[in-house]
Amino acid sequence: MPFRIFKSIFIYLMAFGDLVLIIGGFFAAYKLRFPGQVPGVNWEPFTQITPWVCLVTLILFSGLGLYQLRQHEFTALMRKVATGILAVFVSTMAITFWVRGFAFPRSVLVLAIPIQVSIVCTWRYLCWYLQRWLYGRKKVLVVGSPAEVTEVLGKLFDLPRGWFEVRDLLAPEDLGKLPSLLPSMDAVLVVPSLSRQDKANVLSACLRAGREAYLIPDLYDIMLSHGSLQQLNDLPVVEIQDFRLTWPQKITKRTFDLAVTGAGLILGSPLFLGCILAVALTSPGPVFYIQERVGYRGRPFSLYKFRTMVRDAEKTTGPILAKENDSRITTIGRILRSTRLDELPQLINVLKGNMSIVGPRPERLYFINQFIKETPNYHYRHLVKPGLTGLAQVYSKYTTSATDKLRYDLYYIRNYSLWLDLKIILQTIPLVLGGEGSQGQKEQTDPEKQAAIHALVNSIHQTASGKEG
């Protein structure tokens, strides 16, 4: 019960604290700018725009995912906070222009940024610590086959310490033991290959015991996620609609793409020119790298990027994915990749209609043929245009499996909305600032991590054997 109460009010507490500190940061900046009494002519525009700043702050912070109780790493959380405050700065400038608040001192806006970053980050650290103390350290039971359980444990090991503790493993054939294990658990994690009946039994047992359940979805689960309750006479049915976007959604998405692309090409033209010069002056070869990718409805198209590798990088190796510390990547190429500036020319693809701003990342046919062998549902991601960024890029890593990335892509298609696109764009910004998602594949699995997983599995099995004996 304490956790449920905490969870219901914690988000509102965080939002209230954010607003108080953002407005407080502006107030402190005023005091620094005007040590004595603040002139009324300069103070009045601030009071006039305060409600709008509060509204924009809530929208931006919500879009960045700062009001979702996720198991963030602290550094990733801080990047989101810093991104949100910079966005508030830009929005405040726009609002002052909109309401004709020209007496609002620009020096106050600049002074407010470091103050707001420091106090909001401190506040969010306290919230993060409290969340980890109350919400974290869940005792988890993992249900699934040994091969899948090992893969899931690898994901849990990558989480920040203090969030989850795997206490037991349960094979599908041993589900009869589930009711006796649940009292000592906080949550159950279910792998996707479990049968429908077994999943239903696990969820039913968790509901009866008042325990949380985490389900790794397959295509069937994702299709149901957006179903709507209908009725045939007095018979309740769940309507599963077409997986494709509707025509109004397509028109909205294309209009949004053109607006963002037009603004991006105009505002980013100096950056575009700088990248052209940087590539041309630092390594021999063409500035642009043109590669055939598979797009909407499986149609091939030419994708544009700034060249980040040496000329003819795949001449001797054939198509291979970039690896960590790849020797083929040039010095300036590493910078372009880490900041994702190498993707800028794809705005031309968006303008031409080959791509969208948000969508599944386009892949080469060579790799798609490999992925389809492992994941037959992979072709569903071609039901929308590929994008510069996507849900998989926000929530996954470069080394995330194609199957897991497909889950994100299918969820995006199933739940598309303009607000979801805006959220994904906002959440891409802190990833770019942190250089995440561009490191390339690791050459080999971390042996220490594998040893820790095997040790955990053996320890759980030994404990279980001792209890049975």
Image (cartoon, grey):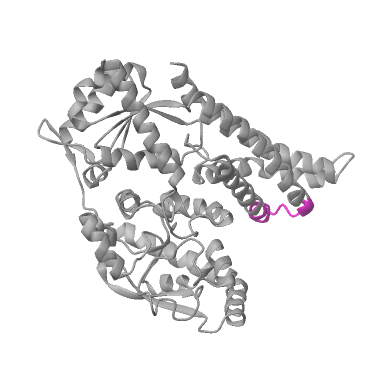
Residue extending farthest to the bottom is: 285
Q: Is residue 116 magenta?
A: no
Q: Is residue 363 left or right of residue 311?
A: left
Residue 278 point in image, percent of width and height: 61, 76
Residue 444 point in image, percent of width and height: 42, 55
Residue 47 visible to the viewer: no
Above or below, comparing residue 359 to residue 192 in the picture = below
Q: Quadrant of the N terminus?
A: top left
Q: State which region is magenta.
A: 93-107
Q: Residue at x 53, y 28 (%)?
A: 131
**Residue 149, image quadrant:** top left
Q: Is residue 320 left or right of residue 431?
A: left
**Residue 369, image quadrant:** bottom left
Residue 93 point in image, percent of width and height: 67, 54
Residue 47 point in image, percent of width and height: 71, 41
Q: Is residue 95 magenta?
A: yes
Q: Residue at x 17, y 36 (%)?
A: 196
Q: Residue at x 36, y 65 (%)?
A: 362
